[in-house]
Amino acid sequence: MYKLKKHIVAFLIFSLFLLFLPYQSEAATAYQGVALDNPTSVYSQASTNSKVLKGYSAGSILKYHSYSTNWYKATVYVSGRATTGYIPKGAVDTIDSTPETLSGVAKPSPTRIYSKPATGAPVLKQYAANTVLKYESFTSNWYKATIYKSGKAVTGYIYAADVETADRNPASFKGVALQSPTRVYTQTSTGSTALKSYNKDTVLSYESFVPGWYRAKVYVSGKARYGYINAADVVNGDPTPNSYKGVALKSPTKIYSQTNTLSSELKTYDQGRILSYQSFVPGWYQAKVYVSGKARYGYISSADVENASTSSSSLQVRALVDKIQVHTYASTNAPSIKSYSKDTILKVYNFTSSWYKVTVYVNGNPVTGYVYKKETSTNLTPDSYLNLDLRKKANISAADIVNFFDANRPNSHLKDYAQDFIDAQTKYGVNATYLVAHAIWETGWGTSALSNYKHNLYGYGAYDVCPFTCAYYFPTAGDSINSVAYMVKTNYLNSNGAYYYQEHGSTLIGMNVRYATDQNWKNGIANLMERIRTYDDNYYASASVLPLNSDRPSTFGRDIPKGMAYPNNTILKFPDGITGKITEGVSFRSLPYTSAATYIKSLSQSTTVEVLGYNTDVRLNDKYPYDYRWYRISVDGQEGWVYGGSLSIQDLLQVVNITTTLNIRLEPKTGDVIGSVPANGFLKPVLKDGKPEIVDSWYRVYLPNSTTKTGFVSGEYIKVVNN
């Protein structure tokens, strides 16, 4: 029994010994590597706590075999006897078993070649920074190089951080020289010798090398040499060029040998010819041409061609000229394939800014041709003022405008502004016939209160809820014409305008979409334009679009300045000194219109304000905020508007139940008449103990436009106004 226990214990100990032995692969792999530590120790066991058999200096080349996850096994000689030892994996850098041949650039100056892969080893040779070197991969931190000393090849080592290795798989480029001259250097340094020089804009071929430098093959005295181009000295051609078709714009359009209009021409084309080319560098395309039967690459200035549209969608256009031609290429000088009569509808495709592409049939065969856009219209109905581009100059003069009014409304003051309409056309690029017609439409031939009191010919600034009050005041009618011409041009007629409608463009139809809710607006304006001057299709077909030639005109306010005439049936003024109180917090506004732009400030409850009156054009209905009248008030000397539902007016009387005038008498009932007030007019009562003074049902009041003289009016015709 005792012997059995002894055997079991021995077995367990042996098993534990095997368990803690390092794992070993079945077939050990042989390696060579570089000692990293100084010294790099070889241990008697796979443990750094074991005895050191031998030590090697950093940079020594060692041979060893795979052993375990963290250790290599090596044979060393101790006292002449081969002994197995162990090296920690972190103490050596294994040499590349399949070295790769490389090129690179020296970084520090000098860049040293060491006798061993250690920076403390003797230096065999050294090179200046930016020298191009050849070497091969060795370890993760070192390259191996062959150098020559005294005519003999010697192996040395380069610290990996001391060189910038060139692209292992260099990308090929074609690019353009930017400098004059652009040099190809012997080394990657602008201070090195130039192998060759090229003129600015020369097209060069080269490949990627190191950051900031390309490598190029050049020929010197008939022999191929590699040199180096500074990346800042060239611009690369498009690595994935896009292919284009386009139209030659110049006569002739040239294909150059280099990206320079002074270089030799490979070939020329007539204006309008259809060309194929591809993207190259900014400002230039690359094209394949044939010279004497041989394919050559040449270069087209991007300013000399216009790229064709890539859209495949078709559209219909209407011929504007009597005999529209379909040309063989995009030039009015090109031969005609076919022609069509005026107003013929053609199916076309967008090609360039000036040309459509079209397919026509000649002898039953489809043929591609080109139609000049200026000879067509996308409006398929015959042209009229409805679809006129309102940026085109009108074919009328100031005298024509005066003659039109003399023949139709000789008393209209609008004819006095004939030259202003013409001047606005010149300054702001808006058709003068339209400006006249629009003014007639908005003012009723110049009879509106807006035109007479605010010199506003277009209702500019008016809102539906306050058409007179909110419209702008202009010092002169000319100011009104200028302001509206500028606004219409920049907002409705220019393609980047806030209210431009792309489908119908710069026309009355396009304007009507966002300018007026009344869809008959465009027809009314067009009919007036036709009356002023019959539409001339041929004139407008060739008329050019007018530019914006003047800055934004001066801006003005909306109120009629004090002392100027005003319509007293629209602007009702209360007697001086009428006050009111704010009954709840409310916004004080510049206009009787609720928007962020009209807000001045907030008025708190119980604020006392001076109430100036109200305007009859401001909407009054059962819907907020127009379920109460809006009042003009003054707060701390600033005039504005307040919603009447938040205002209680104090001590204001209004004449009612009468259609003519109400007499003001010196005494109640039978006193002498000392004044009068019109029907619906307002009076300020004389207060007694804080209330209106009443004698025998007669109110004592201040005479109009007086703060001292008083009289009496019958209470039968008086209403106390609160709001």
Image: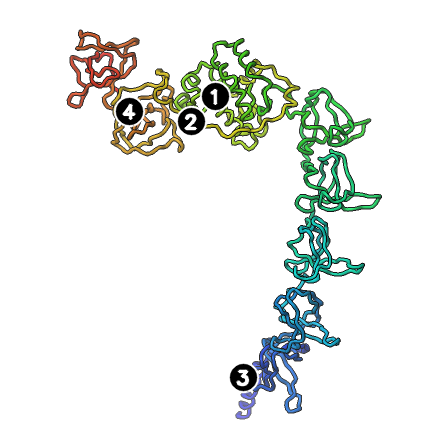
Place of residue 661 in the rendered image (x, y in percent of width and height, measured from the top left): 28, 9
Q: Residue furthest right?
A: 293
Q: CA distance from mark 2 to mark 4?
A: 25 Å
- Horizontally, is 225 left or right of 603 in the view? right
- Please tell me which residue lies in front, 242 or 533: 533
Q: Earlier in the sequence, mark 2 or mark 4?
A: 2
- Which label sits on residue 611? 4
Residue linked to disc 1:
478
Place of residue 422 in the rendered image (x, y in percent of width and height, measured from the top left): 54, 20
Q: Residue furthest bottom?
A: 2
Residue linked to disc 3:
49
Tag 1: residue type?
A: Gly
- Please tell me which residue lies in front, 45 or 540: 540
Of marks 1 and 3, the one in the foreground: 1
Residue linked to disc 2:
556
Q: Within 10 angstroms of label 4, few (less than 14), some, or many (20 or more) residues?
A: many
Q: CA distance from mark 2 to mark 1?
A: 13 Å
Tag 2: residue type?
A: Phe
Q: Earlier in the sequence, mark 1 or mark 3?
A: 3
